[in-house]
């Protein structure tokens, strides 16, 4: 037998084994913290939720949706929300409430765990599971693969509201802040000096999202993200269900339906971008102004999204993959709320007033300030011809 001092020295030289022995000797921790045992009496949900339902305006302000919309979502997903075999399981309504509070306030998991009287890991699991369930349940209804008929309806809306014909949506990207992922280097570090994943989206005239892609690294540019996106592949291979070419209203000039974007995007037969700001003549400047006004729909959609779901206004302290699921959930919830509750939401009205002043909401187009120009891009002769057709059309209409 070796002396005890030799055994102790051997254990110290093997930290993994030493740690296992120490952990075995520790007393078993209590399963539920004493604060969390009072969840049914002192937890935020049980103290506040049923009182909120008595005041619809307060409910909307607190959870960013009406009572009817909340109940509609709950009915659709309650059977898919996991119920444990614990004595006091967390109900589906409490899980949905918790998830909406996280998305609408941006509070940390630890903060929510304290106020709701739950464990931090429990809160984290509930949020991620519920976000994924909401996306999977509603995406086919509120953000389906657009058909030709749906895109044609969008184009009619853009012409009716902004007199921009054959436009099936405005496209742009938004940086969503995240905590620096371990070992990621500078891949997620953008030119705005923070870490982010990028939400690239197309919006219709009602500020609803037609299609989104989330997860590109913040270091990439909007044009680079677009060129590597699934949307680009669909458009390039002509399988995006674009409506057929149509004559511009009041003329016999037939042009294809297009998306509209800013200077970061390339000029394509299916994507219009402004003319470079150098050496603009009145026709080109007028085209840039008209495109800029119509393109504000996507900027307004992003503004509404960030104002309503404030998790997007701070660092999302999860992995990039889970952050992408959270962002997707906020987008589909935004579509649901706009569809069911209309445009009376305070956040919606504030963003519309900000992006569309009173003299720009119908048929008056005032030239916005030009902010630099994009780099040179090679565009096909056909794409340039289409842009010229739009520019000449806007001179007379």
Image (cartoon, rainbow, N blue to C red):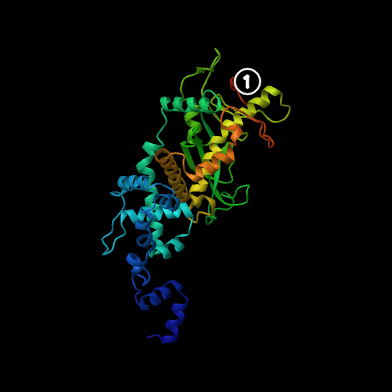
Taking the spot 42% from the left edge, 64% from the top edge, the residue there is 115
Which is nearer the eye, 44 or 80? 44
Quarter containing the N terminus:
bottom left
Q: Quadrant of the C terminus?
A: top right
Report whether 186 appears left or right of 95: right
Instruction: Work out whether residue 239 can be spotted.
Output: no
Against 9, residue 231 (above or below) is: above
x and y, in percent, of residue 309 in the image: 48, 49
Give residue 336's quadrant in the image: top left
Residue 51: image location, x then y, percent: 36, 57
Left or right for 123, reference 306:
left
Tell me: residue 186, above or below residue 371.
below
Which residue of the protein is positioned furthest toward the top in this rendering?
Answer: 252
Report the front residue among 308 and 5: 308
Position of 200 relative to 16 (above/below): above
- Mark 1 neighbour density, 10 Å: few (under 14) some (14–19) many (20 or more): some
> What residue is shown at x 52% (from left), y 25% (from top)?
159
Q: Position of residue 134 (x, y in %)?
A: 37, 46
Q: How many marks?
A: 1
Position in image of residue 180 (x %, y %): 55, 55
* Residue occupying the point 38% across, 70% down: 35
Which residue position is annotated with label 1? 388
In the drawing, does residue 148 fall left or right of residue 365? left
Residue 304 seen in render? yes
Q: Is 150 or 55 nearer to us in this picture?
A: 55
């Amino acid at each position: 037998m070796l002396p005890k001092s030799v055994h102790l020295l051997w254990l110290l030289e093997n930290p993994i084994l030493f740690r296992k022995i120490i952990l075995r000797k520790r007393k078993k921790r209590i399963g539920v913290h004493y604060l969390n045992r009072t969840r049914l009496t002192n937890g935020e949900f049980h103290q506040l939720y049923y009182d909120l339902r008595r005041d619809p305006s307060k409910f909307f302000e607190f959870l960013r949706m009406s009572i009817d919309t909340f109940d509609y979502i709950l009915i659709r997903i309650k059977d898919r929300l996991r119920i444990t075999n614990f004595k006091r399981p967390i109900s589906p309504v409490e899980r949905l409430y918790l998830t909406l509070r996280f998305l609408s306030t941006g509070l940390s998991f630890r903060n929510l765990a304290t106020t709701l009287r739950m464990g931090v890991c429990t809160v984290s699991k509930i949020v991620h599971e519920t976000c994924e369930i909401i996306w999977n349940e509603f995406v086919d209804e509120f953000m389906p693969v657009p058909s030709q008929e749906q895109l044609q309806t969008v184009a009619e809306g853009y012409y009716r509201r902004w007199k921009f014909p054959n436009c099936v949506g405005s496209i742009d990207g938004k940086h969503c802040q995240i905590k620096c992922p371990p070992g990621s280097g500078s891949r997620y570090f953008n030119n705005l000096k923070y870490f982010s994943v990028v939400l690239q989206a197309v919006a219709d005239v009602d500020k609803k999202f037609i299609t989104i892609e989330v997860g590109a690294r913040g270091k990439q540019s909007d044009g680079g993200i677009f060129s590597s996106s699934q949307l680009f592949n669909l458009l390039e291979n002509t399988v995006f269900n674009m409506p057929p070419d149509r004559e511009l209203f009041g003329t016999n000039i037939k042009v294809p339906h297009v998306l509209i974007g800013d200077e970061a995007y390339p000029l394509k037969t299916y994507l219009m971008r402004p003319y470079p700001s150098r050496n603009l003549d009145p026709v080109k400047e007028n085209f840039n102004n008209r495109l800029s006004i119509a393109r504000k729909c996507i900027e307004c959609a992003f503004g509404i999204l960030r104002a309503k779901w404030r998790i997007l206004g701070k660092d999302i302290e999860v992995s990039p993959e889970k952050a992408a699921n959270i962002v997707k959930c906020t987008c589909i919830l935004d579509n649901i709320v706009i569809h069911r509750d209309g445009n009376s939401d305070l956040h919606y009205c504030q963003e519309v007033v900000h992006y569309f002043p009173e003299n720009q909401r119908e048929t008056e187009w005032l030239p916005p300030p030009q902010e630099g120009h994009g780099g040179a891009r090679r565009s096909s002769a056909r794409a340039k011809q289409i842009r010229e057709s739009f520019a000449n059309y806007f001179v007379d209409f």
